[in-house]
């Protein structure tokens, strides 16, 4: 009797272990997919809204300051353009599939009627988002190309463009509004869709950095590589998943414009803490966010133009060199 009871107990334990293992098997849920909150999430709105991809989990939106860690852990990730190259050059198993957003940066001014071109920023204080990220590199490269000296600080310095960094666009807008109300001059660099909200509060748009970048780089298309999609090798080798994923990404640009009034709601439904929660975007605002999938093969030249610009500012931000050809999916 004791042997029979023992055998039954062992059998029950085995069955429980197998059931538990099956329930914990992450492979059955598909490839994991992470996206940082904010403008990069615009690149996958249709997937967030229910465009299912067999074998891929619904994208998880995460705080933007965690994306470098989460991207290493995930199978698929949306990341800043420089981070993708940096991860690859560090030896991480990632491949670049394509660019999702192509720049949404603008320069605004409070009481800045004397600013008509970049050179007019000399001797002024600029509040900016994104220190040591794509917004920062774009702005600093444009300043360098214009022969303007860059500095950091809390007050304007003679003969230089002095930049004071803030954590997000709302903080920059707050500084600009305070300056406007006090009658003092101040400049800000921030991204759509925050730019439209800021202009509604009486701030003036001075420059479209995408247009300035196109002119400075000699590019055929307005903008630059900003948010990109990377995958692990096992995903890149899964032809069915890659085909479905790319098809969804290609359709997303039109989806965002056609569903402009729902975009913020879709993102907030996936991530209630989103910076977009409670907002509504117009079509014109989202068009200025420059969403649209460009494959790694088609966009490699534009992407490397961005990387070369970053090399001039901070080579370590991309791992010290341009990635080799194996980095590019389908390249």
Image: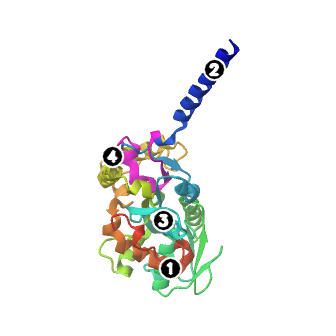
Location of residue 97 by image quarter: bottom left
Image coordinates for residue 15, horizontal then vertical, percent: 56, 26
The residue mark sitting in front, 2 or 1, is: 2
Location of residue 177 by image quarter: bottom right
Q: Is residue 312 visible?
A: yes
The residue lying at 42 percent from left, 72 percent from top is: 209
Q: Confirm or deny contact between disc 4 and disc 1 (CB under 8 A).
A: no
User: What span is colored magenta in the figure?
Assistant: 28-53
Question: What residue did someone put label 3 on?
Answer: 84
Q: CA distance from mark 1 to mark 3?
A: 14 Å
Q: Confirm or deny contact between disc 1 and disc 3 (CB under 8 A).
A: no
Check the picture and name the quadrant holding the N terminus.
top right
Question: What residue did someone put label 2 on?
Answer: 7
The residue lying at 40 percent from left, 77 percent from top is: 305
Question: What residue did someone put label 1 on?
Answer: 311
The residue mark sitting in front, 2 or 3, is: 2
């Amino acid at each position: 009797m004791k042997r029979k009871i023992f055998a039954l107990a062992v059998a029950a334990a085995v069955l429980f272990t197998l059931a538990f293992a099956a329930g914990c098997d992450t492979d059955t849920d598909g490839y994991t997919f992470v996206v940082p909150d904010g403008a990069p999430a615009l690149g996958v709105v249709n997937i967030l809204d229910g465009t299912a991809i067999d074998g891929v989990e619904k994208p998880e939106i995460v705080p933007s300051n965690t994306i470098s860690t989460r991207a290493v852990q995930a199978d698929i990730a949306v990341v800043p353009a420089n981070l993708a190259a940096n991860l690859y050059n560090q030896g991480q198993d990632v491949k670049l599939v394509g660019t999702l957003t192509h720049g949404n940066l603008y320069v605004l001014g409070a009481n800045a009627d004397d600013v008509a071109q970049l050179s007019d920023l000399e001797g002024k204080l600029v509040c900016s988002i994104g220190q040591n990220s794509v917004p920062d590199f774009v702005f600093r490269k444009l300043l360098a190309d214009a022969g303007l000296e860059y500095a950091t600080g809390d007050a304007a310095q003679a003969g230089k463009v002095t930049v004071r960094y803030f954590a997000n666009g709302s903080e920059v807008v707050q500084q600009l509004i305070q300056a406007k109300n006090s009658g003092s001059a101040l400049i800000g660099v921030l991204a759509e869709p925050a730019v439209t909200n800021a202009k509604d509060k009486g701030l003036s748009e001075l420059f479209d950095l995408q247009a300035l970048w196109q002119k400075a780089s000699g590019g055929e298309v307005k903008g630059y590589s900003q948010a990109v999609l990377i995958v692990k090798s096992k995903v890149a080798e899964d032809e069915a998943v890659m085909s479905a994923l790319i098809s969804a990404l290609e359709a997303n640009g039109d989806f965002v414009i056609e569903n402009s009034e729902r975009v913020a709601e879709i993102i907030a439904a996936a991530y209630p803490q989103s910076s977009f929660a409670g907002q509504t975007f117009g079509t014109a605002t989202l068009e200025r966010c420059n969403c649209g999938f460009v494959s790694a093969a088609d966009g490699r030249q534009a992407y490397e133009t961005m990387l070369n610009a970053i090399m001039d500012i901070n080579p370590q931000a991309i791992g010290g060199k341009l990635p080799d050809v194996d980095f590019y999916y389908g390249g």
